[in-house]
Amino acid sequence: MSYPYPPMPGQPPSGGQPGGWGAPQPDGYGQPGGYGQPDAYGQPGAYGQPSPYGQPGAYPQPPAQAWQPEMPGGPMGPPPMGPPPKKSSAGLIIAVIIGALVLVGGSLGGAYFLAASGGSDDDPSASSTPSSGSSSTSRPPVASGGGQNKPVTYNSMKSWSLWNSLNTASGDSKPLTLDEVFADDEAKAYKDTSDSTVFNVQGNGRLDSDCGSTVSGPALKTALQGYGCTQVVRAAYVSADQRWVGQLAIFNLRDVTSANAFLDDLDPKSGKGFFVPVTGPAPVEKFGSATTGAESGAYGHFVVVGWAGRVDGGETSSYGIDTISPSSSVQQAGKQFLFHRN
């Protein structure tokens, strides 16, 4: 059921008919009734009883009020027009850009510092400039007069039971001679089985009894004296293709213990020195112009060392890997006499 708006002050109810605010309405059966009117049974009020307010069946009526139009959105009025404004993301974007610039600037600054300082302080070699042809290590020191005074690579093997009969000089007292050392055909011309390169001895070799004069470095000279060195045989070898030059040295020491210890003294890492190569006709004088490597071994009281390097000007390994086979060939040629003496 709809209700008319209340009448304005001084005006009759809507439509001029009874039934406005405070007017009695017919009940659901079309009979007058309601509160304060006779009900359907002809009795006044609710079931013939007066209303609790002293009026027959009617509640007090509210005073008439002036009509006011209903405001959208409730008594506070309509909401503001349009959706709420969005927060601007410009501040966040600017903060991200500034942070990225700081990171990039820090990285560039660190790289510039490392470049300017030559690398990490923990690696003293990082600031040195590698020589031509070497990507990771500097070239070995150059001896006076040209050439390298020690090998880049060095391998050694200590004496074992095969050579026990040669363990002491007192039990093997025959002194060395050049004829003995180079008597065997393989001692004169040794063929490298890996690539068929042949190494030929140059001249007759050299025999010295002053062991100290055959090595460089005072520490190595002192070591030889302590090991009871009596003889050193040296010789140069040249490959048949003239690409390689080898240097041979044989040390005659007191016993096998001295020989094994001398192998460690010869190691370039010890810094004590190495044996002095012999001179000879071309291309022997070019020895040491490129990377060199050495192979050594103790055989009872003898130490035999083969040392080789490229002399044809071709490219060589900065680590001396390509010198292993040539230096081994020279060492094998120099120890042939041992198989006859043992």
Image (spheres, helix red, strand yellow):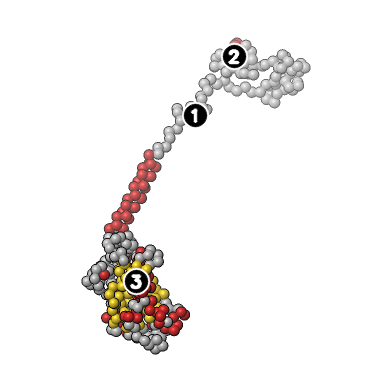
Near mark 1 (Cα within 10 A), the count class, few <14, some 14-19 or many ≥20, is few
In the picture, which quadrant includes the N terminus?
top right
- Residue that lies at the very extreme toward the top in this rendered image: 16
- Kind of residue indicated by mark 3: Ala
Please give the residue where the numbered disc 3 appears in the rendered image: 189
CA gap, disc 2 and disc 3: 144 Å
Q: Which residue does the image show at 60% across and 23% down from the upper left?
A: 62
Mark before the other along the chain sequence, 1 or 3: 1
Up the image or down, 274 lies above or below 23; here it is: below
Front-lying residue, 198 or 37: 198
Which numbered dot is residue 215? Answer: none
Choose mark 2 or mark 3, whichever is in front: 3
Q: Which residue does the image show at 44% across and 84% down from the upper left?
A: 165
Image quarter of residue 143: bottom left
The answer to whether the residues at label 1 and label 2 have Cβ atoms under 8 Å apart is no
Q: Is residue 2 at least partly visible in the picture?
A: yes
Up the image or down, 123 lies above or below 28; here it is: below
Mark before the other along the chain sequence, 2 or 3: 2
What is the secondary structure assignment of the residue under circle 2?
loop
Near mark 3 (Cα within 10 A), the count class, few <14, some 14-19 or many ≥20, is many
Residue 273, image x and y in percent? Answer: 30, 76
Image quarter of residue 316: bottom left
CA gap, disc 1 and disc 2: 30 Å
Please give the residue where the numbered disc 1 appears in the rendered image: 76
Up the image or down, 93 lies above or below 184; here it is: above
Which numbered dot is residue 13? Answer: 2
Choose mark 1 or mark 3, whichever is in front: 3
Front-lying residue, 108 or 275: 275
Q: Which residue does the image show at 59% across and 17% down from the upper left?
A: 4
Near mark 2 (Cα within 10 A), the count class, few <14, some 14-19 or many ≥20, is some
